[in-house]
Amino acid sequence: MKRQTLWTYDFTVITIGSFISVVGSTLSSFALSLVVLDYTGSTFLYILFNVAYQLPMLVCPVLAGPYLDRVSRRRTIFSLDFLSAGIYLALFLLLRAGWFNYPVLLAGSMLTGAIGSVYSVAYDSFYPNLITEGNFEKAYSISSLMYDLAALTLPLASALYQWLGSAAPLFAIDAVSFFVAACFEVTIRCRETHVKNASARSGFSAAEQFRRELREGMDYIRGEKGLLMVVFYFTALSAAGGAEQLMLPYFRNHAGRYAVWLVSAETLYAVLANFMVAGRLVGGVVQYRIHIPKERKFAIALVVYVVTTVLEGTVLLIPVPLMAASFFLSGVLGVTSYTIRTAATQSYVPDDKRARFNGIFQMLNALGGVAGSLVIGALAEVLPERLLVTGANVLVLGAVYLFIWRGREHVRKVYNREV
């Protein structure tokens, strides 16, 4: 039977709208990180600012999951994008007036983190419904490409910030981006059958219905050993991911080591990071064009998990040209891992449980990320960044063995499927 086209009206609209908002968000988040570093001069306060964004993810996704399994995810998506447009417009006006207050920005970071975490659950749960049968891997290769293309703007963000001396114009771009994205998302036509099914299950009070559905979601994950092992592994990966936040401070704190290069240390880091983006772009294009036999998906994912961990754990120990090669290879392999895992899990979980699964998954990932960031941020005050980056990735290798390799019988059932 001939495979259906991936590029339906709804899939095209969600792709264009998402890309527009991701570009604006990428520009502003990088610039704001530089603002915080410049004003505070502290690696710990910089990481604390990032932690503030992650804190709502400890609660909001798991609370949003049962709710988003009952209401329109499409409406939630475009409503939150309109709200984000207003928030970034306000930030533009404040920064344009020369205003800066670290505690208030910390609170603002928590607010945008709460919005982003609910949006992410809604988007991740709605997106599979816009993919035609047999095209999941192609769709998620496109999804990864959006973020990678947006990341190519990082050197532009750094250059604009240094040239203008303010992040305000970047926030104006962000506000426009979110507004335009929401206008696209309003036009999506997909009928959400999970809303009708949820209405049929009603009959309890709102609080009782929420409690029942949250427990049902947790019971579902506990009963699916393959999904459980994947959730545990990525939670550990998120905890170790706190070390990635040391990359920018490392280049700033050791700028003398890179004085031979004709750009600032921050811009050099952004350029190197774009080698990973380039790798992900190459990997995404390859993933879009090829079909991985279902019986090989688990083995490929396992090898990728090991190799990328080794590359990321040693990247600060090697010269800049080898750093560029390491970033590039990590990008190629990383998008392969992302596509296999996301396509497999999102197609495996039933639509009426998908938001709860995504909510719990993101909540545990955020818990790992917050804990890891706080510990690594505190240790960064007394220990070298290189040591922390390498040590964190050694722990990731342990998680690969404990959850993916030892749980291979169950994980293989999730990954080795035709999607």
Image: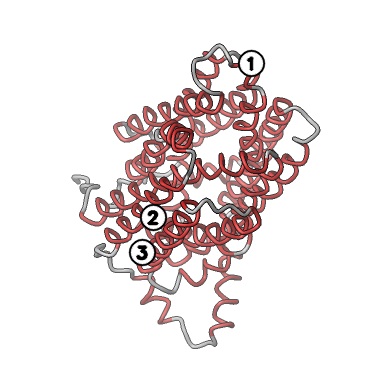
Location of mark 1 (residue): 257
In the rendered image, the residue lying farthest to the right is 382
Q: Tell whether 337 sits left or right of 21.
A: right
Q: Are marks 2 and 1 in contact (CB under 8 Å)?
A: no
Image height of 401 relative to 210, above or below: above
Q: Nearer the viewer, mark 3 or mark 2?
A: 2
- Determine the residue positioned at 41% across, 82% down: 200
- In the drawing, what numbered circle is on residue 173? none
Q: Nearer the viewer, residue 332 or 408?
A: 332
Which badge, 3 or 1, is on the more N-terminal residue? Answer: 3
- In the drawing, what numbered circle is on residue 175? 2
- In the drawing, what numbered circle is on residue 78? 3
In the rendered image, the residue lying farthest to the front is 97
Query: Rounded to the nearest whole Å, what is the CA distance between mark 2 and mark 1?
Result: 37 Å
Image height of 130 relative to 198, above or below: above
Q: Nearer the viewer, residue 141 or 408?
A: 141
Q: Amino acid at mark 2?
A: Ala
Q: Tell whether 1 sits left or right of 353.
A: left
